Image (cartoon, grey):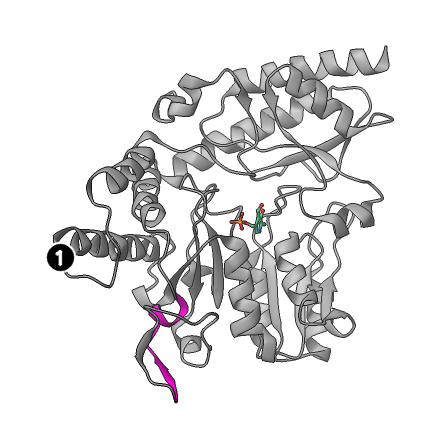
């Protein structure tokens, strides 16, 4: 099966696209739905009561329902739309994390799970702790337990799959440790939802972060799953229209979740179109997606291993990304020469500067594949990489 057929980008571009970790390509059904909204049903949600407004309100709430089911049966009030994983993490930081004494993160966090904590004046040892990782970038479970023993009632916020290295954290194991110490767990699923089956109940997390544009949906959209029990005690993150039951000059009374967290006019077209990504993924099934991607990453690893001077930072198990460097050659120079050959990879620190610093590097070359890639893409990439290396070494 050639899945590229479902993505118009591939018919319009000769680029070998290996940057799905930055943003995924969009299926035709998603693009059509965006068009549909602007061409046929352009109206606001949750406000007016005429025909098109009702159609889009129903569509908007239907995506919420679908997304809840997609992540393992979350209810509508537990799904809050945001403008991306970054905003979801900021909502968490402001509405929940602010009152928590200690925030514990992993060594592999994206800046969006570091900067919001700095903005609260937290630094290492002063409200923020970081779990160490081993030589293979593996999570140090004992260190987490040590930190939690000293700091019960903490918020542990960590990535499911590292965007920079493709390392997957064992969330079920982590969640057992976290809850033993009366703490809460937020899983940043920005890089996992497009690659593996997610079930928030099975993972036993309290929060789950979603990025639509990395999950074959439109840009400018994300979501956060918040476990029902926590919704009441969380304050709204922003205030404005659509989030309130009543307003006087004396006070504002907020609606229940999800509306109290969704002030202002949302990205309606993106929400409507995201339902098409979810339906598309459900049709293909994650068992198929995981099988395709596992094979591709194994093939990529084997092909890279043969390159002289290759440095990889973790073992053959990679999900959604594989990072490497070549001894003595700048990743930026390699990136430029790959681009000249129409190979799209990301080079740099991947918004993960602290782990780069720990590894003593400025950045890496990152290949991030999706199920629409194939062996031919990897062969073309390896050929272009060899050419770039021969030019840079020569
Ligand atoms: N978290 C991780 C692990 C990411 O990789 C990214 C983006 O690369 C984000 C959060 C931010 O996602 P968004 O672009 O949806 O704000």
The answer to whether residue 172 is visible is no
Query: Total number of numbered labels?
Result: 1
Q: Is residue 76 left or right of residue 250?
A: left
The answer to whether residue 97 is visible is yes
Residue that extends furthest to the bottom in the rendered view of this protein: 250
Question: Magenta includes 259?
Answer: yes
Residue 178 image offset from top left, x and y in percent: 59, 71
At x 66%, y 12%, the residue is 383
Q: Quadrant of the C terminus?
A: top right
Q: Is residue 66 above or below residue 394?
A: below
Q: Quadrant of the N terminus?
A: top left
- Density class for disc 1 (Cα within 10 Å; few <14, some 14-19, many ≥20) is few
Residue that extends furthest to the front in the rendered view of this protein: 249
* Residue ID for mark 1: 50
Q: Is residue 146 left or right of residue 45?
A: right
Which structural element holds mark 1?
loop
Which image quadrant is residue 38 in?
Answer: top left
Q: Which residues are magenta?
A: 250-262
Residue 86 image offset from top left, x and y in percent: 55, 55
Question: Magenta includes 106?
Answer: no
Residue 250 image offset from top left, x and y in percent: 39, 89
At x 19%, y 55%, the residue is 53
User: Which is more toward the observer, 196 or 229?
Assistant: 229
């Amino acid at each position: 099966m050639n899945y590229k057929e479902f993505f118009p980008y591939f018919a319009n571009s000769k680029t070998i696209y290996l940057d799905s970790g930055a943003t995924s390509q969009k299926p035709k059904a998603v693009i059509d739905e965006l068009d549909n909204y602007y061409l046929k049903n352009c109206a606001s949600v949750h406000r007016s009561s005429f025909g098109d407004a009702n159609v889009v309100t129903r569509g908007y709430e239907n995506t919420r329902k679908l997304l809840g089911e997609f992540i393992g049966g979350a209810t509508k009030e537990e799904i809050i739309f945001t403008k991306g994983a970054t905003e979801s993490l900021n909502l968490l930081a402001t509405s929940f994390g602010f009152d928590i004494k200690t925030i514990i993160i992993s060594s592999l966090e994206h800046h969006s799970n570091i900067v919001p904590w700095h903005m609260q004046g937290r630094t290492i040892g002063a409200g923020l702790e970081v779990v160490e990782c081993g030589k293979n970038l593996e999570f140090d479970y004992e260190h987490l337990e040590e930190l939690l023993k000293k700091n019960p009632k903490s918020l542990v916020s960590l990535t499911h799959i590292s965007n920079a290295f493709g390392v997957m954290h064992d969330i079920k194991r982590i969640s057992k440790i976290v809850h033993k110490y009366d703490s809460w767990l937020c899983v940043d699923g920005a890089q996992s939802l497009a690659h593996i089956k997610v079930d928030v109940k099975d993972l036993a997390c309290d929060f789950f972060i979603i990025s639509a544009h990395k999950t074959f949906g439109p840009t400018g959209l994300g979501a956060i799953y918040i476990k029902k029990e926590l919704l009441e005690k969380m304050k709204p993150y922003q205030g404005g229209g659509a989030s309130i039951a009543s307003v006087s000059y004396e006070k504002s009374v907020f609606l229940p979740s999800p509306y109290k967290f969704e002030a202002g006019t949302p990205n309606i077209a993106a929400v409507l179109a995201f339902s098409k990504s979810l339906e598309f993924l459900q049709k293909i099934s994650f068992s198929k997606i995981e099988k395709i991607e596992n094979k591709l990453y194994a093939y990529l690893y084997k092909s890279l291993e043969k390159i002289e001077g290759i440095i990889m930072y973790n073992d053959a198990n990679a999900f959604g990304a594989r990072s490497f460097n070549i001894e003595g050659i700048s990743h930026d120079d390699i990136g430029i020469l790959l681009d000249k050959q129409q190979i799209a990879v990301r080079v740099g620190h991947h918004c993960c500067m602290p782990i780069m610093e720990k590894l003593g590097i400025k950045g890496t070359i990152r290949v991030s594949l999706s199920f629409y890639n194939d062996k031919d893409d990897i062969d073309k990439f390896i050929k272009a990489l060899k050419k770039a290396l021969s030019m840079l070494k020569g």
